Image (spheres, rainbow, N blue to C red):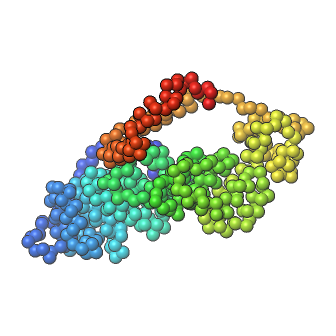
């Protein structure tokens, strides 16, 4: 995939410490006007307030309330009376909060002049995140504005690097989910620049802070759904399955349409990766599996992988639906893998089998095609087999190989996950809301049982004095 004109994103989505840059010379700041006139809400006064502010919190309050919303946005998107660009008056690091309001307004007000792309890129690399976090809704607005401006300019890839820098710099840690995450991933998918999303997707999301970002339930669904799309495009099936499952099974009162789409893609990815589907987690919304059964995908799953003729008929009959759902590519890949999974299932039953018998079992009439398929599967280590001169295929178990580097990598990953789980448990233990619910739940259970749970379930149990370790052998 061509990546011309874009710098490659770093391998880890953490902001690179940059040498302290000397503040660039800026144009003279206009002197503050007389604030006794409450009707004077010109950009001149706004710039004066930005450059003289000592409290970011108070400045954010003033910028949000000094005029009605429509009037504010027009003022933020305008130029100074002498035609001077207000961005040339402000310093990115000293005036991050004020510039954030101006940039986001100029990217959304239709009649305003768009800020230069190089200025947006510089801001996303250099802004002070502590200031920007006072106005999370403006950060979201800036991110959507960058994506929209690039799309209107006909080159979405121009938005990827500034969005990446904005996301990495704004997030306190790589495990925080923000509103920038789904915007960035959607831009990568729309631009078909899937590799740019990998450094972000590689970091597991474990923290959601509503004070940091104006997140909604849908943001979480869109992020994981789009992440699954990225991994699917790169044929990284295990990661795609994980992301689609998180999206489909996220708890909610009513399932969203995107969750049914995620469930459909999850099932198709499982067919490609494992040759069969896995039961969904118990915490999935109960209506989603029922809705899935009413789709043509359910018939496709039921016929998979042995009934290839029926599978082809389903694809031909429902092709328009599959294409409209943007699942035709996954359907065709699953169809291509059907014969391979049928052959792999034969290896668990037979030690030797003639090519003609294999062809009959998997629904392929040509022996040459069956031979080519088996040879390809042997070469790709999908099966371990030999083909004799008379066309007999002899299956065997693949040799077990342990590579020290693989073992070390698995152990390191396990240690990392253990560390994350420990931190999550500590955070939950400090949560007053969680502790209150836990105590209430325990009290409710005890009252329902009519006594203390320990006494009723242990001391009065007819087998409470048994050695449970010894009883395991009799189960």
**Does residue 304 appear in the picture of this structure?**
yes
Q: Residue at x 34, y 40 (%)?
A: 429
Residue in the foreground of this view, choosing between 96 and 253: 253
Count of numbered circles on the image: 0
Q: Tell me: residue 222, above or below residue 468.
A: below
Which of the 4 image quadrants contains residue 97? bottom left
Left or right for 164, reference 59: right
Question: Percent position (x, y) of residue 418?
Answer: 44, 34
Q: Residue at x 34, y 76 (%)?
A: 111
Residue sitting at 10 percent across and 74 percent down? 37
User: What is the residue that sits farthest to the right in this orientation?
Assistant: 390
Task: Judge from the rendering whether residue 154 lies leftward or rightward of residue 212; answer left or right.
Answer: right
Image spot of residue 242 (x, y percent): 54, 48
Answer yes or no: is residue 411 visible: no
Residue 253 drawn at (x, y percent): 46, 59
Q: Position of residue 33 (x, y in %)?
A: 11, 69
Say which of 74 and 237 sits in front. 237
Question: Residue at image x 31%, y 62%?
Answer: 138
Q: Determine whether 62 is above or below 202 in the image.
A: below
**Front-lying residue, 404 or 19:** 404
Establish if 125 lies above or below 69: above
- Side (left or right) of 17 relative to 243: left
Quadrant of res 219: bottom left
Q: Quadrant of the C terminus?
A: top right
- Placement of 260 over or under 397, stated as above or below: below
Task: From the viewer's side, name the closer residue of 269 and 114.
Answer: 269
């Amino acid at each position: 995939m061509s990546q011309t004109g874009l710098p490659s994103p770093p391998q880890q989505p953490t902001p690179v410490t940059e040498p302290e840059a000397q503040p660039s010379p800026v144009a003279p700041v206009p002197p503050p006007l007389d604030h006794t006139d409450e009707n004077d809400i010109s950009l001149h006064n706004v710039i004066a307030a930005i450059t003289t502010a000592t409290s970011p919190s108070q400045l954010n309050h003033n910028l949000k309330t000094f005029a009605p919303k429509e009037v504010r946005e027009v003022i933020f998107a305008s130029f100074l009376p002498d035609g001077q660009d207000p961005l040339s008056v402000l310093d990115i690091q000293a005036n991050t909060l004020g510039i954030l309001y101006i940039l986001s307004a100029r990217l959304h007000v239709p009649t305003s002049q768009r800020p230069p792309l190089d200025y947006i890129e510089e801001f996303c690399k250099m802004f002070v995140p502590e200031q920007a976090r006072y106005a999370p809704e403006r950060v979201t607005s800036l991110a959507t504005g960058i994506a929209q401006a690039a799309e209107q300019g006909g080159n979405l890839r121009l938005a990827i690097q500034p969005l990446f820098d904005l996301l990495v710099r704004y997030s306190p840690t790589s495990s925080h989910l923000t509103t920038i995450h789904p915007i960035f991933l959607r831009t990568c998918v729309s631009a078909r620049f899937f590799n740019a999303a990998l450094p972000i997707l590689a970091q597991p999301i474990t923290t959601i802070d509503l004070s940091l970002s104006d997140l909604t339930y849908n943001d979480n669904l869109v992020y994981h759904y789009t992440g699954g799309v990225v991994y699917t495009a790169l044929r990284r099936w295990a990661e795609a399955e994980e992301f689609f499952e998180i999206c489909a099974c996220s708890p909610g009162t009513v399932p969203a349409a995107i969750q049914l789409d995620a469930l459909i893609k999850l099932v198709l990815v499982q067919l490609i990766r494992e040759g069969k589907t896995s039961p969904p987690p118990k915490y999935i919304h109960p209506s989603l599996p029922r809705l899935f059964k009413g789709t043509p995908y359910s018939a496709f799953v039921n016929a998979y992988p042995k009934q290839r003729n029926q599978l082809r008929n389903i694809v031909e009959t429902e092709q328009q639906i599959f294409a409209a759902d943007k699942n035709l590519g996954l359907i065709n890949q699953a169809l291509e893998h059907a014969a391979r999974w049928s052959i792999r299932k034969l290896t668990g039953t037979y030690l030797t089998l003639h090519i003609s018998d294999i062809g009959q079992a998997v629904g392929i009439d040509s022996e040459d095609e069956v031979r080519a398929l088996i040879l390809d599967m042997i070469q790709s280590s999908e099966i371990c087999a030999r083909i004799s001169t008379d066309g007999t295929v002899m299956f065997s178990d693949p040799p077990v190989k342990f590579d020290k580097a693989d073992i070390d990598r698995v152990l390191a990953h396990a240690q990392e996950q253990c560390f994350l789980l420990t931190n999550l448990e500590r955070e939950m233990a400090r949560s007053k809301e969680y502790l209150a619910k836990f105590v209430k739940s325990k009290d409710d259970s005890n009252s329902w049982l009519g006594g203390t749970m320990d006494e009723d379930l242990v001391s009065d149990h007819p087998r409470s004095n048994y050695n449970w370790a010894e009883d395991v052998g009799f189960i």
